[in-house]
Image (tube, rainbow, N blue to C red):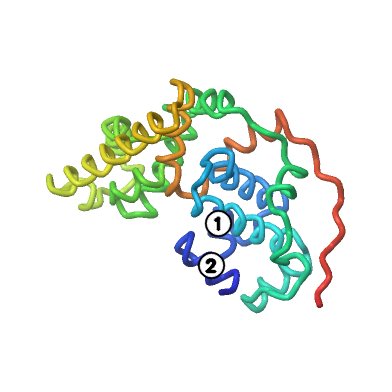
Amino acid sequence: MGLLEKCEQLFNTSNLYEVLGVSKDASDAEVRRGYYKLSLLVHPDRAPGDQQATSKFQILGKVYAVLSDKEQRAVYDEQGVVDEESVTLSQDRDWEEHWRRLFPKITMKDILDFEKKYKNSDEELQDLKRLYLLHEGDMDQIMDSALCCEHDDEPRVRDILQRAIDSKDIPAYKAFTNENAKKKANRKRKAKKEQQEAEEARKELGMDAEDSLVAMIQQRQKSKEKGFNSLISDLEAKYCKKPSAGKRASKK
């Protein structure tokens, strides 16, 4: 299975830019931040033993490798294909070691500090409005995609969006304004199940309170939408050193 097919399987899109949550005209820095943010959420250290997370981490490394190489990115932009035989996409590459060369380790405290800063900010408002428009008011998809949100945040999220509707900032989609009770109940049941799974994992692994919080964040971030760059911008500015110029991959 090629890279594009694997992207479709793991990220529900074969578009490399959509995988990283950036536009086609994104700068190199924006591509790098998109890669960093997503790879941070599925890094093996964050979800030990999660094979799907490990697979996503490896695929994200390959996506970034293609889009960070000027020649390969140009071919992809023009033809919509990637060179599966290139050294860059070699199956023997240690993607975790490559990631650690590019980025430092970010602590869970940094993530939690960001959550406190992000919630109820103007940036969150803009992100929620964008998600609302993207998913045409479908709260299932909005809640699955919104950064730093769990089920308990739903009333707050709904209130934010309703105020935006009332002020004519966004249209009143029926999927949002007339959502039926059954759909809301299913969403609540799904969230409760995820919380129970996180608690069971905590007990099984003997996690302390902080580790438990990490597990819950991991659980709810597995399906998060890919467009939020501010977390990485903030953390990267604080911690990340510019990577040394690497050798450009040559094609076989």
| Left or right position of 251 against 73 | right
Query: Seen in the image, is 136 located left or right of residue 9?
Result: left
Indicate whether 206 appears above or below 186.
above
Instruction: From the viewer's side, name the closer residue of 110 and 230.
Output: 110
Where residue 72 sits: x, y (%)? 74, 69
Q: Pointer 2 and pointer 1: residues touching (CB < 8 Å)? A: yes
x%, y% of residue 159? 28, 32
Give the residue type at disc 2: Lys
Residue 70: quarter of image: bottom right
Q: Give the crowd class for mark 1: few <14, some 14-19, many >=20 residues within 10 Å.
A: some
Q: Toward which corner of the image does residue 93 lie, by quadrant?
A: bottom right
Q: How many marks?
A: 2
Image side of residue 99 versus residue 6, left or right? right
| Circle 2 or circle 1, nearest the eye | 1
Q: Secondary structure at mark 2?
A: helix
Residue at x-position 16% and y-position 43%: 185
Label of residue 55 in the image: 1
Residue 181, percent from left and from top: 12, 45
Q: Which residue is mark 2?
A: 6
Distance from the alpha carbon under mark 2 to that under mark 1:
9 Å
Residue lying at 44% horizontally and 32% vertically, measured from the top left: 205
Q: Earlier in the sequence, mark 2 or mark 1?
A: 2
Q: Residues within 10 Å of mark 2 (few under 14, many from 20)?
A: some
Where 225 sits versus 248, above or below?
above
Q: Residue furthest top?
A: 209
Q: Identify the element where label 1 is drawn.
A: helix
